[in-house]
Amino acid sequence: MMMKHKWKRRRLSSSQTIMLGFMGVIALGTMLLMLPWARAEAGGAPFLDALFTAVSATCVTGLITQDTATYWSAFGQVIILCLIQVGGLGVITVAVFITKLSGRKIGLMQRSTMQEAIAAPQMGGIIRMTGFILKMVVLIEALGAAALLPVMIPEFGIARGIWYAVFHSISSFCNAGFDLMGIKEQYSSLTSYTGGMAVNVIVMVLIVVGGIGFLTWDDLKRNRLHLRRYRMQSKVILAVTGLLIVLPAVYFYFYEFGTPVWVDMTTKERILASFFQSITTRTAGYNTVDLTQLTQSGQMIMILLMLVGGAPGSTAGGMKVTTLAVLFATAIAVFRRRPNAHIFGRRIPNDTAHYAATVLILYVSLFLAGGIFIGCAEHMSIVPALFEAASAIATVGVTLGITPDLCVASKVVLIILMFLGRVGGMTIVYAALSTKHPYVSEFPQEKIMVG
């Protein structure tokens, strides 16, 4: 009786709730995609293909084992799009919205979970923030779809053009990278629009807006162009995002697309391709050029950009731009022999620096372990294997074209990396250790030399 009573009193932590929520959505998506009418041809999809697709869509990654446009039926594509939308918003955000619509009271535990899910600094006003997020998502995705209609309808007809505009708007905003352009050429992504100004600009804007985070939207709404009033976090996100768009784009333009391989590209195509590849590697998953034609230096730069990712509390993945900023600020503080890091005139707590270093080690360890495993299992060179692993752990979705041909073990590794990358490695750790008792004593201190 005592054990039963203790079991009833145990509650799931926020980390456990988030993790189980994603697992539940993935399980449901897998079952739906295995239905016979989810596949374009007769018969249901194999379990591994359905699971891989469900994980990739829910974790807004974009890696695929089967071409989305030709393998899945209209029903299957709708299921994939729903998984993308839920995964982009976050399972908890959707659950809170449904709870609110049903008229039920949202308790303290749900608010705490919501705070962690969207990386909000405080619990106060979290329900208002949820409503703001949902309204903005609907508005931005609708505007994106409307902007794509003049391109999609003339090319694909009215019905299919509308569907393609909606699908690619949601997929772009959620940084998912799923596309329906396989009807032109399988696994072609957006390579047929290398010089298409409208598609490039619309998709890039949607990717960036989705990747800067919900709290940054709130700052933009409240303070407009008064940058001094912004939260320090929003300033960091906008500044680092800008740098990580412009600097790689300059490299791609002058070096990668300046080589003889791309001699047929016009100046307009080089500019668009440079910015698009710089932006898409921040967890979007589309590509407008054949990435296998890039040099290994260019592919390694894309790997680094993938690992950084977007902003916390956004539709993007990766370690997050704020983690990179905190690590650099901490390094500068060490160089200057300061006790704390400083950014935009604000002191960064030491525990934040510790957390950033832990996230870096966790992501790099998972990335290297996954890449080395895939390289050994597939007997391939290390760069394509590392590229695939980075794309999975950072929930990006760009690929060098090896995903469909990987063995079962490599696909399982990618599934694990995608799940860890979307839910968050630290969330998994906290979920596993949430019932452990905190330490109430400390060991004796002794210095160790580093560096």
Image (spheres, grey):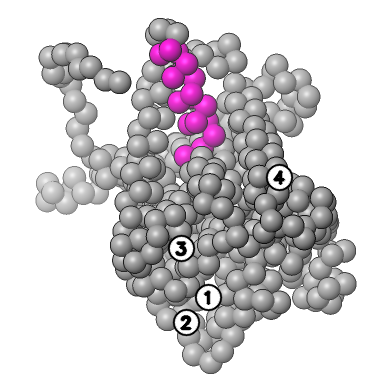
User: Pointer 3 and pointer 4: residues touching (CB < 8 Å)?
Assistant: no
Query: Within the magenta stretch, is there residue 144?
Result: no
Give the residue drawn at x 51%, y 86%.
36
Amino acid type of disc 2?
Ala
The answer to which of marks 3 and 1 sits earlier in the sequence is: 3
Give the residue drawn at x 60%, y 26%.
236
CA–CA distance between discs 3 and 2?
15 Å
Amino acid type of disc 1?
Gln
Q: Give left or right: position of 195 versus 109.
A: right
Amino acid type of disc 3?
Val
Where residue 429 sits in the image (x, y, percent)? 30, 42
The answer to which of marks 3 and 2 sits earlier in the sequence is: 2
The answer to which of marks 4 and 1 sits earlier in the sequence is: 1
Q: Give left or right: position of 53 versus 246.
A: left
The answer to which of marks 4 and 2 sits earlier in the sequence is: 2
Q: Give left or right: position of 120 versus 152.
A: left
Range of residues picked out in magenta:
319-335
- Regarding residue 55, the answer to whether it shows in the image is yes
Q: Main secondary structure of the magenta part?
A: helix
Q: Which residue is mark 1?
A: 66
User: Pointer 3 and pointer 2: residues touching (CB < 8 Å)?
Assistant: no
- Regarding residue 30, the answer to whether it shows in the image is no
- Nearer the camera: disc 3 or disc 4: 4
Tag 1's secondary structure? loop
Give the residue drawn at x 81%, y 75%.
156
Rendered image: mark on residue 253: 4
Q: Which residue is mark 3?
A: 55
The answer to which of marks 1 and 2 sits earlier in the sequence is: 2
The answer to which of marks 3 and 4 sits earlier in the sequence is: 3
CA–CA distance between discs 1 and 2?
10 Å
Query: Within the magenta stretch, is there residue 320?
Result: yes
